[in-house]
Amino acid sequence: MLYCNSCLQPDTRPNSIFQDGICPACIYNKTFKNINWDERNKELKTVVDFGRANNHSGYDCIIGVSGGKDSTRQALFVKEKLLMKPLLVCLSPPPEQVTKRGVDNLSNLINNGFDCITINPAPETWKKLMHLSFYQYLNPFKSTELALFSSVPRMAIAYQIPLIWWGENSALQVGESSVMGESGYDGNNLRNMNTLGGGDISWILDREFKENEILQYKLPSKDEVKRANLRTVFLGYFWKDWSLINNGNYSALRGLDVRNDKPWEMGEHVGVMSLDEDWTPMNQMLKYLKFGFGRTTEFVNDDIRNGNLSRQDAIKIVESFDGKCSNKYIQSFCDFIEIDINEFWRVVEQKGLNSKLFDKISPGKYQPKFKVGVGL
């Protein structure tokens, strides 16, 4: 395990290749001072013109939203700055998972003058697939991510809205190179991100599920995307100030309700992520135990690259909070998929605990072998 010499990105991140000790996200960040923003705005205008020229339904673009910080800022930018007419699409977790905060935030966004379609997959199927994802991949969100990333293009095809706005380009902004398209704003390769696995659902179909039961979890094929002339475009590519913190501040000033949990309860110190449900802190903890980094690392890397935090101060924050998760979130998840807490930790140790990075103290307690900022 090695760390980027500039930020605190470890080389254990899937699909991330360092160059001379620097992670892809820091390499991209250093190009910012050389960006010709006039040319980039011309590219943006071309995309907007494409959406308007293909307005077959009264909507000239579509945006997937949760009501959180990124989707709130994106939707308002598209409506108020680009003067477009977007259709919002929200994939909602089942009642056992969704929070009142999440419902209120979505309502706050809709009240800014948007049409929004909410998709609610069958809770029992959702539960079974989370259970399967946890046991097979130690990533209970693998199935829900499939549903999230499938819902928007499927709705775009149904409503004949070929322009899809997405948020950040993870290839540029966190270094997941498999997502990179033909340009910095081309998002048509989103299906290649690590969690989605190219849209492969054979691991689901190998079980008791039939294809017609899991339509919400099936990405449109490349042929379907081509026939519908879909273009997924990363809106963050066109913003000088895209960041987790900036998006959070912008949206909070426009009514976003943020978390008030303690940092050691949710594994990060800001409180603007995953506002619509409470199991992401648990999933980030699992990521930490597999790869040695979690949500706090993502936040501080953003601040380091933007010059708001020194690497040394960032190390202290990561050491304090990364990988932490309150037992109440773990217990809530276990209750939902109907396992006990001992079984939860047994699966963690069997399926994903990285013994190269952690020593086991006791079930649920693991000591990192690595030093943050240095590695092994």
Image (tube, rainbow, N blue to C red):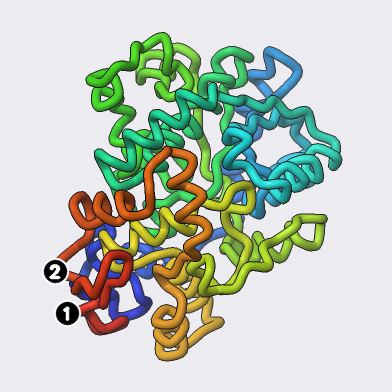
Q: Is residue 347 above or below residue 273?
A: above
Front disc: 2 or 1: 2
Q: Circle 2: is it few (<14), some (14-19), or many (20+) Cα within 10 Å?
A: some
Between 70 and 49, which is closer to the camera in this rendering?
Answer: 70
In what quadrant of the picture does the C terminus appear?
bottom left
C-alpha distance separating marks 2 and 1: 9 Å
Q: Where is residue 110 in the image (x, y as percent from the top left)?
A: 80, 37
Quickly name the residue at label 2: 356
Q: Which residue is drawn at 39% across and 63% down?
A: 28
Of all residues shown, which one is farthest toward the left? 356
Tag 1 residue: 376
Q: Can residue 118 be seen in this view?
A: yes
Q: Which amino acid does label 2 sit on?
A: Lys
Q: Quadrant of the N terminus?
A: bottom left
Mark 2 and mark 1 lie on one chain; the one further toward the N terminus is 2
Secondary structure at numbered mark 2: loop
Question: Which residue appears at 33% of the width and 51% of the height?
Answer: 344
Which residue is nearer to you in this view: 321 or 76? 321
Task: Residue at 41%, 42% (x, y): give it.
Answer: 141
